Amino acid sequence: MKLIICPLLLLFACILPPSGADCQDMAAIDSFFLKSPLAIRTEVNGQTISNDFPLYNRVVLHNTGRPMAGINLEDRVVPGDMDYYGGIFREGISTNQVVFKKSLDMTLADFQKPVKIQSTDFEKQALFNWARFEQTAFFSRVSFLSGTQFLRVAFDSSAILNFCRFDDNAFFYGSTFKGHCSFNDTKFNRDAVFSFCNFNNTLKYNRSAFHSIARFNNSEFHQGGDFTNASFDSLADFSNSTVTGKLDFTGADPPKYMDMSGMQEIDGTIDLMRVKSGLNYEVCRINLLYSDISKFHLTYGQFRLYFPPGTDYNDKVDVYEDLLENFKARELDDSYQALDIEFSQFKYKEKRQSAANLVHKFWWNYGYDKNMIFVWIFRILLFFTAINTFFIRKLITAITELPFLSKKTVEKHHLHHPIIAYFLNFPGTLLYTFILLVSGSSGLSIIKDHSKIPNVVWMLYMIILSLVGLSISIFIFNYIIN
């Protein structure tokens, strides 16, 4: 219901120009409309929101416009509210070393000449919603200390906002940047919302710092984007965006979470190969659901896959398989191994096969450390030999006497001190245990008379030896085949 009411409120606000409430009414409407950046990602009046959403045109249609003189301020403090709602500026705007103590409202303004605002502080709200910059918009070393809104702004020429600072949420939702766009060395201390933006030309965020959430979801990058040496914090959301060219994150400090889901239209690459590692977060959890994973360049050192709660099993499998194919095609063996191991663990977990997962993990690291088989075989052999040596006289009585280990030999060693006897019998018992394991694994039996087995415990012990020997033989056979 809120989504239906919001456009009507904006239209009503434009038909009846604001009066004594100055820009506060419009700010309240914008605040209501943008209460949650994700709340308007679906539909309004049954119409899907996109960069072509016609609400802007309907609002502008009812705006008569007010001709304004140019603004040229330098080294001044402006104490009161500045209301330029719907203003048409046919002359340039320039401020330098200026402090605006109260709100500045330039909603629906049309700037026909260049705008140059530098070394300026906005201590209260600065509203540029639905504005149009027909020529260069230049903001340098500007501090927006309170809420800043550039909702659905049309930048017909270059938009330069370098060395700026946004202490509160910065909304650029649905804006169109037709010319070069630059936010170099700019700090966003709260949420930066560039959702549904259209970047038609080159885009730079060199050394920019996003200290909270950075949203670029559903945006269009027509000539890629340069995020080199940028810094992200909790979340960077590029979901459902389209990219032509290259999104370059070289030297960037990645966030805790990066949402790259739904990016099917990529005519270029998403370069995450040379991001920084271990600064804000040890690894970045990345969501690649429903994206063209072949266009992503990354390693599995700085990144780990992330799936939102409730993600379907088959969708997760598709992401794993596509990313494995990506690593294989680019010959990233270490990344392939790390992801393949994680994929194996994922499948065992989903099938609730915890025991099988532990065996494959510790036995041979899911097939990547196959030589570990022989280490474990030797450990198992020593383990059972250590047990069998204590009961060697009973074993050769219940099972059989082998030529190299006769009952007389065991009895002779038994005359020594128990510890000495144990170590004297150990070498022969080692070979004896090996024969038991091999005979059990091959389905043979060296038990001549089963009636000699003392009790059920000994029978179970012999069965365990046979099963262990069979398991070892299977792994060795698999090792030889591969």
Image: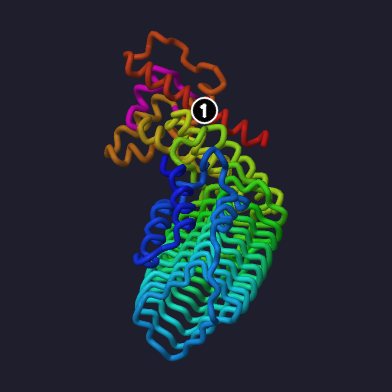
Front position in the image: 71 or 162: 71
Q: Name the residue: 39% across, 26% down.
A: 408
Front position in the image: 384 or 189: 189
Q: Position of residue 380 (x, y in %)?
A: 44, 36
Q: Name the residue: 38% across, 86% down.
A: 77
Q: Residues within 10 Å of mark 1 (few under 14, many from 20)?
A: few
* Residue 302 shows up from this direction: no
Front position in the image: 379 or 309: 309
In the depicted structure, whether residue 123 falls above or below residue 381: below
Looking at the rendered structure, the number of numbered marks drawn on it comes to 1
Front position in the image: 33 or 82: 82
Q: Position of residue 393 (x, y in %)?
A: 35, 25
In the depicted structure, whether residue 481 falls above or below residue 99: above
Say left or right for 21 vs 472.
left
What span is colored magenta in the figure?
Answer: 390-405
Residue lying furthest bottom:
75
Say left or right for 186 vs 52.
left
Say left or right for 438 vs 179.
left
Q: Name the residue: 55% across, 17% down.
A: 443
Q: Secondary structure at mark 1?
A: helix
